């Protein structure tokens, strides 16, 4: 009867409030007595924080995935641009060699540009072994020989 009398004298709000305060007291006592890293308030706060930020974390995971995909696409675009520049340099090298073979005269600046194209093309080919290269080897040697000959004779157009 004693329990029934206590419950009958109190309303449900008082019982819930008392139970809440008892839970707070128990967690506080456990916080003081628990070893480091096993704190119940900290665990409760972590659990609540984890639950409250779940949607944000899921959204951020999606953003990270999309950024990773964009990064991969950007790398592909960059590689395509580099290959396109190498092909353009190869075309300029071969054209310049053909013009020299046809006895067309060029300025020293034109030769310097052709030499820069040769260096850039060779560097790209060295960095990308799967790229179809060695196409300009003979032409590059011919351009270098013509450059040295004209440099010695001071035989550039101006």
Image (cartoon, rainbow, N blue to C red):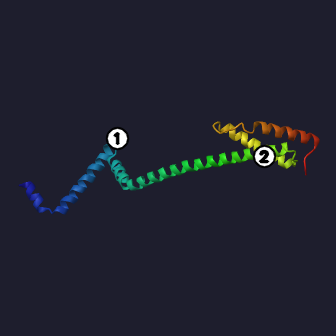
Which residue carries the number 2 mark? 95
Q: Is residue 14 above or below residue 71?
A: below
The Cα atoms of the two marked residues, 1 and 2, are separated by 79 Å
Q: Nearer the viewer, mark 1 or mark 2?
A: 2
Where, by quadrant of the figure, is residue 118 drawn? top right
Q: Secondary structure at mark 1?
A: loop
* Residue 119 percent location from the top left of the image: 75, 41
Q: Residues within 10 Å of mark 1 (few under 14, many from 20)?
A: few
Which residue carries the number 1 mark? 35
Q: Which mark is residue 102?
A: none
Q: Of all residues shown, which one is farthest toward the left?
A: 1
Q: Nearer the viewer, residue 154 or 18?
A: 154
Where, by quadrant of the figure, is residue 14 drawn? bottom left
Labels in figure, total = 2
Q: Nearer the viewer, residue 6 or 142?
A: 142
| Horizontal side, residue 107 vs residue 90: left or right | right
* Residue 34 percent location from the top left of the image: 32, 42
Quarter of the image that includes the N terminus:
bottom left
Q: Secondary structure at mark 2?
A: helix
Q: Residue at image x 76%, y 47%? A: 92
* Residue 35 percent location from the top left of the image: 34, 40
- The first of marks 1 and 2 along the sequence is 1
Q: Residue at image x 20%, y 59%? A: 16
Q: Residue at image x 76%, y 45%? A: 117
Q: Of all residues shown, which one is farthest toward the front?
A: 102
Q: Nearer the viewer, residue 83 or 55?
A: 83
User: Is disc 1 in contact with disc 2, using a CB cutoff of under 8 Å?
Assistant: no
Q: Residue at image x 37%, y 50%? A: 46
Q: Nearer the viewer, residue 91 or 34?
A: 91
Q: Residues within 10 Å of mark 2 (few under 14, many from 20)?
A: some
């Amino acid at each position: 009867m004693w329990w029934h009398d206590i419950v009958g004298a109190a309303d449900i709000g008082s019982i819930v409030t008392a139970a809440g305060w008892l839970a707070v007291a128990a967690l506080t006592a456990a916080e003081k007595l628990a070893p480091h890293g096993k704190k119940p308030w900290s665990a409760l706060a972590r659990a609540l924080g984890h639950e409250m930020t779940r949607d944000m974390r899921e959204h951020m995971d999606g953003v990270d995935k999309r950024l990773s995909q964009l990064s991969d696409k950007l790398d592909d675009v960059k590689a395509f641009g580099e290959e396109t520049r190498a092909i353009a340099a190869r075309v300029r090298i071969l054209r310049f060699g053909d013009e020299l073979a046809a006895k067309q005269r060029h300025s020293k600046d034109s030769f310097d540009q052709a030499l820069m194209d040769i260096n850039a093309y060779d560097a790209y080919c060295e960095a990308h072994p799967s790229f179809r290269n060695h196409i300009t080897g003979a032409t590059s040697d011919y351009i270098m020989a013509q450059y040295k000959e004209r440099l010695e004779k001071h035989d550039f157009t101006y």
